[in-house]
């Protein structure tokens, strides 16, 4: 008999009679003549309850099933008298696939997030992390569906790179040099290395995406990016996923319109398609999550220039750890105040002083600010950072000179401004930050399957 | 007026009257009273023809448009008298966005693939590479649609890893060590490095995927993988994308069924949704491509044990560069003979000698072969490599001991065989190899946006 996934079984409108399921035992309770087995196969949060009578052929073995063990069950799907579940299975056969040894770490009790991080290979078997990673999956798939529908092309930008997009940021080096050889030479001789020069792990696919936007129109990258920042915070990981759309013939307003549409689409998609998993976070992780997400999808995002935001912060009467004045890079405390308390919605800040933004952002007519936008959201701070790009060759070159950036390695990037340059814009959205906003999970380590942070590379 | 993409314009059933398009000039021909502009915006292969009369307000500027320049066009969409195009635009306004300087490398003539590789930032603007990267995009999006529909969860497995999945393969090292510091120390002291130990770029997400399959049921990874192999062939790149599904409660037959369904789905999807782009490859790149793809989607793939394949190769009367005998790792020439000449369809070889396969493959009852499968396809050789995994703890440990693999770093992997182990299977498909098969492109560098090969990391 063909196996049916438990999600499909629980979704059935009418019982088909007999079903065959396979999964793992979450709990087992023994009554006098029966065992009640809660079976889960990971396809959804809910378990299916299996009633195994002691008249079953292999009941002796069924009795041995421990939490975490695996079994196959055949039986009649019938209406369940228990509350909170529509169907249960009256087993006609239970086959034990494997018995989990008794030191299985996930016994039925609450575990701390810290402990579960130490068994990242097992934590997706818990309700919370199963839900988190199913939501993560669905949101990634929804991103592709969104862009397919809009006619955007998906670009696989290279992760190993010779250039540094931001002209900043600590990067990991990638090398094929043999450590024994390095020791013999007494140094890392990159001219003998795989690429014949220094190579790094990328911090952004943007520059590649610009090249493709100027060929294919609308494109996006969605892939891992890396930071070698030695900071052990709840918001930083060395390896994380970033979505970066890039649109030809697009200005800053179009960029913000697109970002707002994207974020609302994803949240609404989660509400529609991840209801059960999302409910877990609304009930047990963050009581404010539901209303917050409702606000997010229903109200327009605020938009205002950086300069106005600075005025609001200076006049708000709040004492911040980092004092606010024009020209500073806003801190998380400032960003969250604006989104959470002042506007009570996500807010786009625009037109930042050029000194605190990268070279590729388009200079505004005032000669002081650039056509940048950051999207600040409640609970997170900056979710998205983007800009209209500087498409004017002479302005771009002057800006690179101003900050002392060597133009030679960027010959290809500058080419795009020589040949058919057009206004274009894009942004980057940290996928983990989005997931943290969506689930209320407060530590980035808990939305990444196997997180990479300083000193941490088990699994 | 809102911009319409040229693809949408060309797809229109009825002309809406006025349209507004933006794009790049592929060619311009000047007649006495008109200019004919072929405008392309990357949304599709075809250009839209624009008729710009010399009575236009800015005709002086229009006359200056060179190949590669960018322009905005407003005009009436009317039936085209020319053949091969349904609509053309009678311009009422043409605005020059930018003029490409005259040394634009993509003048109207044929360029070699070698030359175009040297301008990888511009080649997506050509017909061939535009088509290739639109197909690549669509196939990646189709992979996600396929798995969403099947209820598989998308796992983002880590790229920076402390372990080596295959127990083989040359890996890139990832380090946060400062080269100046390395020189001072005279060596790479990994205990002082970012992760406190050696770290590498992954060659496979499989081991992570197994952990998640044993939690969520059916999962897949689709992300970059890396090989530091110093080989300059048409088939190898240092960075490439791999699709790796992993299925709980699945055996080798289920694994092959799934692989066959996937490959056929993707090819059929390309035929349905990338027709125009695919036609370019069928007409100009490989005349056999059309019939070959038709065969692929319509005929069942062959399946036979490695042992039988060896017999076929020994008896076929062909002299191979590498002689065939039981126990050898088949070479591309052998694989292609089987797929192209003997079976004339894709063929799964199964049950390889354990000595030539990795430790995690499930031992067959004969104690000699493992439940492996490779899918060999015409023109490419190995497209997919997979197996049922060894789910029995004692057999797995014995195998690791046999090949001298230290079990300690795999404590978490072995945990999955201690707690709720079940039969499971999966495979890896090189995404670039698939694209080469689909398009007839014979060099892997030409299906990757910015390829990474020895000595090559421009852009």
Image (tube, coloured by chain):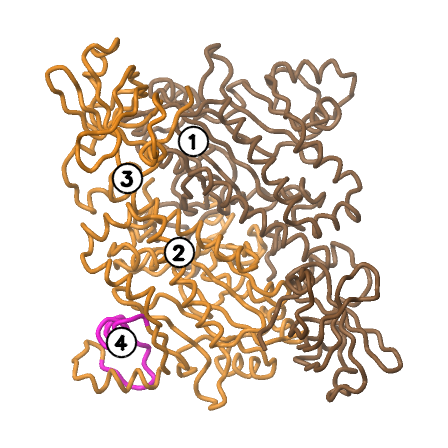
Chain colours: A orange, B brown
In terms of sequence position, does the residue under pointer 4 or pointer 3 come before the other?
A: 3
Quarter of the image with the C terminus of chain B in it: bottom right
**Do callouts 4 and 1 mark residues in contact (Cβ within 8 Å)?**
no
Nearest-to-viewer mark from 4 and 1: 4
Q: Find disc 1 in the rendering and name its residue.
A: B247
- Asked if marks 4 and 1 fall on the same chain, the answer is no
Between residue B188 and residue A375, name the one nearer to us: A375
Q: Nearer the viewer, mark 1 or mark 3?
A: 3
Q: Tell which of B93 and B387 is nearer to you.
A: B93
Q: Kindly check if marks 3 and 2 are in contact, taking CB atoms under 8 A apart as contact.
A: no
Q: Secondary structure at mark 1?
A: strand
Which residue lies under the disc numbered 2? B177
Chain to which the residue tagged by mark 4 belongs: A
Q: Residue at x 28, y 15 (%)?
A: A92
- Of badges 3 and 2, the one in the foreground is 3
Q: Which chain does the residue under circle 2 lie in?
A: B
- Could you tell whether A170 is left or right of B80 in the image? left
Compute the Cα span from label 3 to label 2. Answer: 43 Å
Q: Is residue B217 left or right of residue B231?
A: left
State the residue at coordinates (42%, 43%). B154
Dots 4 and 3 on the same chain: yes
Marks 2/4 same chain: no
Q: Which residues are magenta?
A: A323-346
Circle on res. B270: none
SS at mark 4 in the image: loop
> In the image, residue A206 lies at what x, y percent?
51, 65
Q: Which mark is residue A343?
A: 4
């Amino acid at each position: 008999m063909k196996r049916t996934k438990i999600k499909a079984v629980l979704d059935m409108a009418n019982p088909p009679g007999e079903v065959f399921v396979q999964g793992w035992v979450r709990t087992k309770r023994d009554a006098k003549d029966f065992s009640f087995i809660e079976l889960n196969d990971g396809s959804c949060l809910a378990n299916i309850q299996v009633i195994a009578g002691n008249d079953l052929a292999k009941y002796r073995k069924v009795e041995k099933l421990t939490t975490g063990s695996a079994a196959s069950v055949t039986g009649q799907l019938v209406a369940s008298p228990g509350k909170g579940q529509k169907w249960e299975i009256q087993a006609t056969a239970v086959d034990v696939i494997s018995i989990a040894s008794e030191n299985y770490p996930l016994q039925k009790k609450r575990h701390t997030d810290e402990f579960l991080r130490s068994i990242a290979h097992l934590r997706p078997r818990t309700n919370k992390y199963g839900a988190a990673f199913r939501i993560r999956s669905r949101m990634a798939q929804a991103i592709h569906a969104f862009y397919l529908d809009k006619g955007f092309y998906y670009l696989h930008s290279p992760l190993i790179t010779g250039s540094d997009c931001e002209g900043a940021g600590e990067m990991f080096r990638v090398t094929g040099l043999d450590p024994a050889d390095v020791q013999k030479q007494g140094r890392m001789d990159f001219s003998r290395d795989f690429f014949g020069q220094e190579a790094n792990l990328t911090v952004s696919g943007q520059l590649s995406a610009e090249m493709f936007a100027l060929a294919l129109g609308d494109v996006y990258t969605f892939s891992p990016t890396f930071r070698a920042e030695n900071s052990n915070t709840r918001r930083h990981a060395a390896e994380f996923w970033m979505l970066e759309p890039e649109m030809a013939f697009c200005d800053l307003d179009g960029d913000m319109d697109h970002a707002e549409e994207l974020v609302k689409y994803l949240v609404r998609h989660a509400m529609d398609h991840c209801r059960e998993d999302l409910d877990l976070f609304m009930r047990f992780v963050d009581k404010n999550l539901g209303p917050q997400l409702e606000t997010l999808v229903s109200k327009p995002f605020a938009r205002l220039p950086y300069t106005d935001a600075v005025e609001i912060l200076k006049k708000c009467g709040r004492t911040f750890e980092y004092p606010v004045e024009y020209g500073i890079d806003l801190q998380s405390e400032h960003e969250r105040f604006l989104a959470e308390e002042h506007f009570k919605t996500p807010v786009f800040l625009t037109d930042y002083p050029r000194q605190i933004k990268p070279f590729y952002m388009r200079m505004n007519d005032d000669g002081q600010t650039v056509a940048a936008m950051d999207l600040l959201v409640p609970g997170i701070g900056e979710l998205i950072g983007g800009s209209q790009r500087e498409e004017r060759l002479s302005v771009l070159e002057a800006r690179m000179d101003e900050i002392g950036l060597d133009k030679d390695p960027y010959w290809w990037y500058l080419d795009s401004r020589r040949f058919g340059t057009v206004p274009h814009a894009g942004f980057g959205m940290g996928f983990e930050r989005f997931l943290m906003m969506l689930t209320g999970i407060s530590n980035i380590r808990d939305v990444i399957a196997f997180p990479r942070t300083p000193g941490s590379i088990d699994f």
